[in-house]
Image: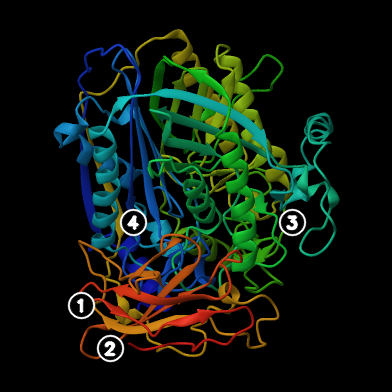
Amino acid sequence: MVTRAAAVLALAGALAAGAAGCDEYRVELAAAERLPARGRLLVGAAREDITPPPGFPMGGYGFIGKTARGVWTPLQASALVVEDATGTPLVLVACDLWSMPAGLADEVVARVQADPRGRGIGREHVLIAATHTHQSPGAYSSAVAYNFVASPETHYDPALFDFLAARISRAVLRAAGSRAAATMVWRDGHLARFARNRMLAAFVRNPARETDDFLAAGAATPPCDLRAPVPDRDACRAVDATVTVVRFERNDAIVGAAVFAALHPTAVGPDLAVYSADVFGVAAAEAARALRSPRGETPVLAFFNGAEGDVSPDWRIQDGQNARAVGRRLAARVVELARGGTTETAPAIGHAFTRLPLPGACVPAEADADGERCTARRPMIGRATLAGATDGRTHFLPWYFRDGVTRRPYGSQGGKVPAIDPGVGWLRLPLSALALLPLRGPTMLPLGVYRLGPLAIATLPGEFTTMMGRRIAAAVAAAMPSAERVLLAGLANEYLSYFTTPEEYGGQFYEGASTIYGPQSGPVVQHALAGLAAAVESGARAAVPTRESLRYRPGPTYAFGLADVATAHTGDDGLARLLRPPPYDVPGPPYPAICFTDAVPAFPDVFYPRVRVETATTDNVWEPLADTDDAGPDFVRVASPRADGSADWRALWMPPADTPPGTRVRLAVERVDAPPVAGAPFTLERGSVVSYCATP
């Protein structure tokens, strides 16, 4: 396993030597040919499992995260390919990943263009985003910074990158190949007490008229109660609680839907050592099941995050119980919104796309302003970054890394105090420079604004706070007055940490300290997106390069795998926060489980053993129990390495509350590298103790 100390030395040496020895790859993109008009709306949808093998450090929680030993809710790439009557395509892809680096997005488009099914699709037609689950792998970013700081272990794994690019592009190509006539229906709604603002102290630094208007608009939302970790009753009103469902129907069945809702999918917390799509994964599985057609067709639901930089799910304790509860509330609202709305039989598609160099970028001076407002030319993180968010502290040197550490503003970084800056004598310069070493992150931001009938969709290349998102939506709406609704797709096309309003930045809380190019970063992106929206509104075709050659240098490489999971199965496999309600240190009744030996999932074709619950018919024939799919939130599979290169597996089933007691069932496994096996039958009864792990 790669230690952080070794990684620091390796990274520092690589950077000092001009990144010698670091992996590098190029992406070649071509301008797309224009498709012939087919006179009707065409839609295709597909989903691909993008869960990697166990053994990868998970991204999003940084050094307090875990290495994955298995999977709870599988990670998915969900693709919708829409083509309007003129032949103009729009590709919407949502991936259960903690981020979407530009290098991966570009590689996906390049692979799509290399296939005949991807004909007519250019980079400007594709919006590809991450849901931001913190239980997805790290080690695939196209920038060395995030391969270094986003996970508990470091380095870049080329095999993981290739696997993700292959699976995501396959989802797009399958969707493109299945295009057929469809209609579009969209509907907005609100979900009260679904999320809360985790940094209200920064939110209220915005102008009083702006915050008062925002809170007044949410006056009908019940206030938060004041149980930990909520410090203020207004926290549940200081978020955009809108849920938008854009669905595509064919023959009275939902083919696919894009769902837009803003929150950090962090309901499980950093202690869970299995891959998980968190709240969005629970919601996708539950809603897709409920929206299944009478003919058994399951829709593809693509969940897109929004301006979620300061938004947490309304959990009280980060565990599986809260994740399932919040996810099921979201699923219920999605199902409700998917059963009505405004029908668009011939929505027009438009697009504008650019790559914005962020360092040193400026917003032109306004009539009442003193001059241009520009971003910093060099990245910098502040004191609060390593402290973590207010409801997810890292507890790393809290006396030093903490919120609210500022100085007299000067330069384009404002009042930010560098993360490592003792401010005394000769130590100041070298230690401040050391703080910047790992921050060789992205500098070029791919931005897009898209028209989908009456809807405008704007991309956010990172984590934007609620108020910064609101300002961007207002600017896009002003530049695109024909749009009835502006939707924000967060963590889309690139990831560059946080973006706050300048006022929020001034407080130097976690989000402001992590806005690495200074207080004008958000306004610069806002200005660029407004310009793209104006271009879409005018109907002008954007100039597209005939060919782009893009270079990415993700840093030192390492091949992760199950061997990096050193511990064998013990107790509940460290899954207490998933399997039991609190208090977690009190043993609870065990769940039905089955133990078996099987191969370790491996690149390039990653397959996990499939688990199902079977029940006996009157003829004593074992058949799958209805609605017990291991892609949902009721199963967890974990692995431990064996000396012979295979793995010891344990699969657990968490029976839903509505499972009828007295049902006689058994667990069965379709193994990857061995014949199927089934455990001993048992009768499911409330309060009964089932053997923790029945070995076939």
Which amino acid does the dot numbered 2 rest on? Arg
> Which residue does the image show at 48% across and 83% down from the upper left?
573
Q: Quick check: 304 left or right of 197?
A: left
Q: Quick check: 401 left or right of 435?
A: right
x and y, in percent, of residue 382 in the image: 61, 56
Which amino acid does the dot numbered 3 rest on? Gly
> Which residue does the image show at 51% across and 90% down from the upper left?
571
Residue corresponding to mark 3: 404
Q: Nearer the viewer, residue 258 or 549?
A: 258
Q: Is residue 422 visible?
A: no
Q: Quadrant of residue 469?
A: top right
Query: Could you tell me if the residues under marks 2 and 4 are in contact, i.e. CB atoms within 8 Å?
Result: no
Residue corresponding to mark 4: 50
Which amino acid does the dot numbered 1 rest on? Pro
> Of tags 1 and 4, which is closer to the observer?
1
Which badge, 2 or 1, comes first in the chain's sequence? 2
Q: How far separated are the C-alphas under marks 2 and 4?
A: 24 Å
> Of tags 2 and 1, which is closer to the observer?
1
Which badge, 3 or 4, comes first in the chain's sequence? 4
10 Å crowding of disc 3: few (<14), some (14-19), many (20+): many
Above or below for 655 versus 75 = below
Q: Residue 642 carries which label?
A: 2
10 Å crowding of disc 1: few (<14), some (14-19), many (20+): few
10 Å crowding of disc 4: few (<14), some (14-19), many (20+): many
Q: Quick check: 95 left or right of 34?
A: right
